[in-house]
Amino acid sequence: MTNTLAATVPENTTNTARPKPVLSVEGLSTSFSVDGDWKNVVRDVSFDVMPGETVAIVGESGSGKSVTSLSIMRLLAKGTSRINGKIMLNGKDLLSLTDRQMRDVRGNDASMIFQEPMTSLNPIFTIGRQISEALTCHSNLSQADARAETIRLLEKVRIPNASSRFDEYPHQFSGGMRQRVMIAMALASRPKLLIADEPTTALDVTIQGQILDLIKVLQEEEGMAVLFITHDMGVVAEISDRTIVMYRGEAVESGPTDDIFHRGKHPYTRALLSAVP
Ligand code: ADP
Ligand code: MG
């Protein structure tokens, strides 16, 4: 539908500027040094994520989804990994940035959430302190303002009694609530892009649904783009506008999610689909 409409708009109208992708990945290849050899685990992966769009990367365990996202955020150990290709985020050429510039990118342009939020939260600091620090390192908020903003973020991710939970520690939260805290922390920098690597995989089905709904609502409210990584086609159907299917380190198929579901061609896509109840 959209394509037909776009094709009928004359080129010289005022609205010819095409939106730029928030994230553009071109020919990404990542290798690891294993026992003296370089093992290539992501091969020639290219895709764009447009502003406000949710793109899913789906594939079985070991297909290279996490390595793709960690390569984008440059979170792989330098000495033992090699990344090639071009990654543009918010107009920044990530593979040419210094480590310090890259830390700013991680704080400001994109945030990432992972499968197990416990590993990203510090067990010895309160939830309130960790979110406040994420806020104050990007702005010069006073402590009182940071506290108020932290509570607002906890409310935004629907944590009941947010203000009374400010001084609690990560272990006092359930898995689903911890994932909400991580999302609140990810929102602290008002990122243009949220990368979510299997954020619901460790949660039970009901909580999974709640977190997916929350991400959808927040995406609309914040206008963020989301790169959502999952092994679950059911989750893909639920959340994504476009889908990239990864198989053994390669993006074997990509397109609008509806097309992938109804007209997916690659044998591996069809195998994934046959597993959807
Ligand atoms: P998934 O799609 O499950 O997220 P990954 O991206 O984690 O898969 O892994 C892709 C492949 O890369 C796997 O074969 C994995 O064993 C390998 N791999 C991941 N991280 C490393 C590493 N640090 N060193 C060597 N091999 C790795
Ligand atoms: Mg993974």
Image (spheres, rainbow, N blue to C red):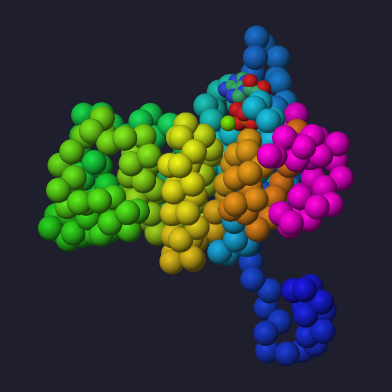
Q: Residue at x 75, y 40 (%)?
A: 273
Q: Do we see residue 141 in this rendering?
A: yes
Task: Say left or right for 63 vs 122.
Answer: right
Which quadrant of the figure shows ligand 2? Answer: top right
Q: Quadrant of residue 79?
A: top right
Image coordinates for residue 231, horizontal then vertical, percent: 63, 35
Image coordinates for residue 28, horizontal then vertical, percent: 70, 41
Name the quarter where the C terminus is drawn: top right
Q: Residue at x 43, y 31 (%)?
A: 116
Name the quarter where the N terminus is drawn: bottom right
Q: Quadrant of residue 144?
A: bottom left
Image coordinates for residue 6, horizontal then vertical, percent: 77, 78
Span highlighted in magenta in the image: 248-277
Q: Residue at x 81, y 77 (%)?
A: 4
Front residue of 225 and 83: 225
Is residue 104 a member of the stretch shown in magenta?
no
Image coordinates for residue 62, horizontal then vertical, percent: 66, 26
Q: Residue at x 28, y 50 (%)?
A: 159
Is residue 254 a member of the stretch shown in magenta?
yes
Q: Do we see residue 109 in this rendering?
A: no
Q: Is residue 64 above or below residue 207?
A: above
Task: Say left or right for 98 vs 124.
Answer: right
